[in-house]
Amino acid sequence: GVGTVLEPVSLQSPEQWFSVLEQRSEELLLVGDGARLYRDMARERLGELARIPARAGMAPNLGPLALEAVRRSERGQPGDVLSPLYLRGVDGAKSNP
């Protein structure tokens, strides 16, 4: 399925992010490294609304998203430009050997 963006992308502490998620009333599927690292906090703050797969730290398969972008481009449909989004400077910085 296709995910839904709940909030605009921003850099927040885990406590701030869970405060935002606590305002939601539907079940939330949490994935990625943050879901794995903050599993206990998620369960404490969100209770039964937090769904965290056993393999939550696994990177999502972006293949279907890329394929859809190619199909839209081939049909001449406008789409978003896919590019990395680094919220922290260190994530996008190249290391000097």
Image: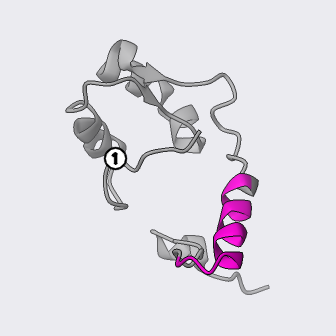
Q: Residues within 10 Å of mark 1 (few under 14, many from 20)?
A: few
Magenta-colored stretch includes residue 72: yes
Magenta-colored stretch includes residue 70: yes
Q: Quadrant of residue 91?
A: bottom right
| Residue drawn at x 70%, y 81% as measured from the top left | 95
Which residues lie in the magenta part? 64-78
Q: Position of residue 68 (x, y in %)?
A: 67, 61
Q: Quadrant of residue 27?
A: top left
| Residue drawn at x 31%, y 52% as measured from the top left | 7
| Residue drawn at x 52%, y 79% as measured from the top left | 78
Residue type beneath disc 1: Leu
Query: Quarter holding the N terminus?
Result: top right
Say above or below: 55 vs 94: above
**Front residue (pair 82, 89):** 82
The residue lying furthest to the top in this view is 48
Q: Is residue 18 left or right of residue 83?
A: left
